[in-house]
Amino acid sequence: MTDELGARAPKYLQIAAELRRSIRDGELKAGERLPAETALAGRFRVSPITLRNALGVLRAEGLIESRHGVGTFVRESWRLQRHSRYRYGRARSDEKLLTAHLRHTIVFAGRAQVRGEIAAAMGVPAGTEVVARRRHLHDQETGKREEVGASYIPTDLAGGTYLEEPKVVPKALFLCIEELSGKRYATARDHWFSRLPTAEEAAALELPTGAPVMQVIHVARADDGTVLEVSESVWPADRIVVIDEYPVEAESAQPDAAPSEV
C-alpha cells in the first residue's frame, strides 16, 4: 500500500486511506456492499482487529455504514439541506412544505420545565414550565432517524390547546402558534453549535462513538419582542448542510457591528 500518510503511519490508517480513495474515486460506489471483513483482511494482509480499526475510521467519517446481519456498505452521499432564511415565507405560500422524504413523529407533547440554553433563549428562569413538543424525523424509505428536536412554547400561548396533544399538527407549527396567539412571527435568530451528542442523542441517531452532531436553537419573536417559540434541532454532522442565501446589503444593517474575517 502506498499513500500520502507514508509507510510509518499505522497500518489501519493506511488501509482507511486506500478505501477512502476508492470510495471518492468511484471504485466503490454509493450503496455498494464492501467485501467481507475476512476478505479485506486477507487483501491487506492484516489481522481482523486492524481491519476493523480501519473500518471504524471510515464509519466515523460517515463514508460507510454497517447493517446488522447484512454487511458493510458505502453510504449514500446525500445530505439534508436546511434553508433557514426565507423558510417562513415559503411555508406561508405552501403549507405542505415539510421535506417529502422525512416522516414526523411526536414522541412527547405537554408541560415541561426548561433549563440551560433553552431557558436563556426564552428569557425565563430555569425551571419555568412551558409547553414542549418533542419530535423525531425519520427517512420515509429506510425508517432511519435523521433528526431529533423539540419546540418550546410559552404556556400562556399554548397551554390547554391541541399543541399539548402528541399528534402532528395539520399545518406548519408556526402557523398554529400565530393562530392561537393572534401575533405574527416577525424576527428569528438561529444559534448554531457543533458538539458531541448526549447519550440519548447518540442512541436515537445510531451514531458511532465520537461522531459529532450539529445543533440549532431557533428563537422566533413577534413585533413586540414576545418570544413565540424556541425550537432546537439536532442532526448527525455528516448528514446536514446549511444553506444561507441572501442579498448583499449596500450598507450595514447593524452599523455598530465591527467587520470580521471569515
Image: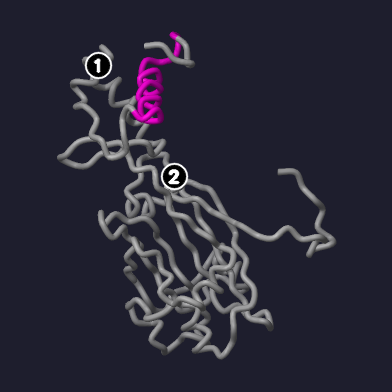
Quadrant in the rendering for residue 184: bottom right
Dominant secondary structure of the magenta stretch?
Answer: helix
Q: Position of residue 102 (x, y in %)?
A: 34, 62
- Which residue corresponds to the image point at 81% horizontal and 58% vertical from the top-left? 257
Say what amino acid the circle numbered 1 marks: Ser
Above or below for 114 versus 80: below
Q: Is residue 16 above or below residue 122?
A: above
In the picture, the quarter occupied by the N terminus is top left
- Magenta stretch encompasses residue 11: yes
Position above or below: 225 against 72: below
Q: Position of residue 52 (x, y in %)?
A: 28, 26
The image position of residue 97, as x and y in percent, is: 43, 70
* Magenta span: 7-26
At 38% from the left and 39% from the top, the residue drawn is 62
Image point 24% across, 30% down: which residue?
Answer: 34
Label 1, secondary structure: give it.
Answer: loop
Q: Is residue 121 magenta?
A: no
Q: Name the residue beneath numbered marker 2.
A: 238
Q: Position of residue 242 (x, y in %)?
A: 53, 53
- Between the residue at mark 2 and the residue at mark 1, the CA separation in whole angstroms equals 29 Å
> Quick one: SS at disc 2?
helix
In the image, 95: left or right of 228?
A: left
Instruction: Judge left or right: residue 120 versus residue 43.
Output: right
The colour scheme is: one colour
Circle 2: is it few (<14), some (14-19), or many (20+) Cα within 10 Å?
A: some
| Disc number for residue 47 | 1
